[in-house]
Amino acid sequence: MFLKVYMEEIKSSIRSYKANEHYKQSLKGPPLYYRVSLNDTMKRAGTTIVDAEFDVRHVFPNQRADLMNGEWHVFLESFEAKLDTQLLKTNIKVCLPDLIKSSQDYVMTDIGVCQINDAVGHVPIAQEYRAPGHDDGAAVPVDALAAKPIAVSKVISADSIGVKIDPVALFSGQIRVLLRDEHHDPLVAGANANEVDDNNDGWRATLLFVHKA
């Protein structure tokens, strides 16, 4: 008896990789954000225009443990101010002293003195110079300064890097906004020159809080 063996050819092919034929699922979800618009006229009683507190107990969920993981960042999305007083400053720093406590960002406040920078944004102040004309060719003295209305805004994308904040403080139910000058000194509330008047001045700000897992 003879045994016949038949060999069958095996044919195979390798298909080239095409990105559009594959589905890639990210292991991380999209950032979660909360946008809070503040107005100094809505601040808590007993606080001032330059050191204002706001009640946000119904904004942020405090029963979700997953929100305590990852990182929380804050952005100053927009800031508008109307200053009738003579504020002789080059810029305003919008600060969140109770929320921003990152040990990665510092500012010099005096010679040899360095502290954590609690500013979320810098707002430049444009000054309008007013002076009388002189026909005798003499130098024109500047006898008054008037602050122009302030309005700044920025576009925040998913890849933008904000300022890291403390989530425990965020869920406390209040936001404190402290306005500082270019030297990182708090602005003073009052009706005198170089002070911010609670009755005649005003500001609005939009803060964007972002949670990244």
Image (spheres, helix red, strand yellow):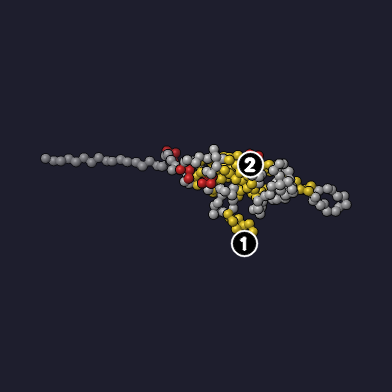
- Residue furthest to the front in view is 46
**Residue 139: image x %, image y %?**
83, 53
Query: Mark 2 to mark 1: distance in Å?
Result: 37 Å
Q: Position of residue 186 (x, y in %)?
A: 65, 51
Please identify the quadrant where the N terminus is shown: top left
Task: Please state which amino acid type lies under the numbered disc 1.
Answer: Gly
Q: Is residue 154 visible?
A: no
Q: Which mark is residue 189?
A: none
The residue positioned 69% from the left and 47% from the top of the image is: 189
Q: Is residue 1 left or right of residue 81?
A: left
Give the x, y percent position of residue 57.
55, 40
> For the point 68% across and 49% down, which residue is it?
188
* Of residues 113 and 138, the one drawn nearer to the viewer in this rendering: 113
Closer to the camera in the image, 87 or 161: 87
Binning the other alpha carbons within 10 Å of mark 2 as few (below 14), some (14 to 19) or many (20 upward) gives few
Amino acid at the residue labelled 2 = Ala
Report the residue marked by disc 1: 112
* View extreme (bottom): residue: 112
Quarter of image, res 59: top right
| Disc 2 versus disc 1: nearer the observer | 2
Q: Mark number for residue 45?
A: 2
Tell me the element at label 2. loop
Q: Residue at x 64, y 46 (%)?
A: 51
Q: Determine which quarter of the picture holds residue 77.
A: top right
